[in-house]
Image (cartoon, grey):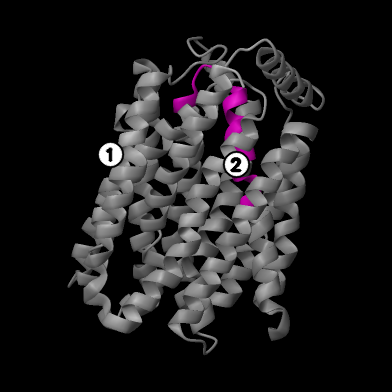
Amino acid sequence: MSPIRDSSWKRTAVLFTGHLVNDGYGGLLAPLLPLLIDRLGLSLSLAGLLGTIQIVVNSASQPGLGFLIDRSGRPSLVALGPVLTLCAMSFVGRAGSYGQIALLMVIAGIGSALFHPAAAALVGGGTRGNRCLRMALFSSGGTAGAALTPLLVVALVQSFGLARTPWLILPGLLAAAFLVALPLVRVLRETAPLEAEGCNAEPRATRLTGRFALLWAAIVLRSLAGTAFGSFLAVLVTRRGASALAGGAAITVFFLAGVAGEFAAGGLSDRVGRKRVLVATIALSAPFLFLFLHGPSALVWFALAVSGFFLFASNPVGVVAAQECLPGRRGLVSGLVMGAAWGVGGIALTPIGRLADLYGLVPVMTGVAFLPLLAATVLLFWREPPGIRVGDVAAIGQASRAHAGTEKRNGGG
């Protein structure tokens, strides 16, 4: 394997762990939301506002931080983000007022904003071959963290109470110190963090419009659906008479299925192209979201898993497709996609919660379930950038593997 390819996968493996920690702790609010609603007497609109605060702070900061990453070329703050996130979110259970929880959401949002654009820019660097598969590995770290956290946290809270959540800071700090910060520093010293074609290019402002705008709009719509279901899923399940543990299990199933979807879509898009995978996976998520909301109880868990598989499958493909639309600005684009686009979904949580207070949660979420269909329709008008179409992606990957094999036969790294 060539040194560049080796360093690309090495960085991705380290950043996978950082994503696991950051998004695992960042997702603590959703499984605790039913308990916080009961303890503080919150309405659904106020509960939704908490998620909005965290995501808006995160999304508003990411494009600017991504731009600074592009300018500096050395995203040194990438290891600090998960630490801020886990420290803030570990104290949610001890917060005695709505204002205290809101402040913790602000700190957690800043932590995520420090991590995501820097990490995505690093993963997007290197050779084009298997780029989306690398992004799938990185993206699956965040989805896996969001999947595993609910069961662990709800089990802890049911055994020891909400006030014990600060103990969660210990495993997170250990993971950040030994599996993220130290290896990451070494990896960044060994390799150029943003090596790739065109990384120093100055793209014209017009390249932000047209092709990128359509893709961004579709990602916004898909992200709004994913954020809304992920945030209110535990509430939907518990209001059907299930326990808080079942609500946490539902989030785990939803996001774990998403991990499988991300890997499947990432590898497939490197072979058949981004557009086909994006349109198919996003569109297929909608009928299973409807089935979860209105289908027979025997199919609820099946529908939840399949909808998560398709809904999150587009995550890595969308990020890489956006980076390919604007190759000289991976940090900025990652901030716009992972921050601003996904942040719109967070902003929408408050009005969604308010509408749910007025008309009921299930009817409102039924409307949200239509959004993936709208996103897939928008993508029908999107064109992949020249040189990134079907066949070109596969040819690039084959050339990279052939080059690595030649070096190996010749005794190279």
Asked if residue 355 is positioned above or below residue 320 in the image, the reply reads below
Residue located 41% across and 70% down the image: 152
Q: Which mark is residue 212?
A: none
Image quarter in which the C terminus is found: top right
Residue located 57% across and 12% down the image: 197
- Main SS of the magenta part reads helix
Q: Secondary structure at mark 2?
A: helix
The residue labelled by disc 2 is 136
Image quarter in which the N terminus is found: top right
- Residue 369 located left or right of residue 46: right
* Residue 253 visible in this rendered orientation of the protein: yes
The residue labelled by disc 1 is 80
Type of the residue with mark 2 = Ala
Magenta part of the protein: which range? Answer: 312-332
As for residue 321 lying within the magenta part, the answer is: yes
Instruction: Give x and y (percent) for residue 344.
Output: 47, 48
As for residue 228 lying within the magenta part, the answer is: no
Type of the residue with mark 1 = Leu
Viewer-side residue, 221 vs 245: 245
The earlier-in-sequence mark between 1 and 2 is 1
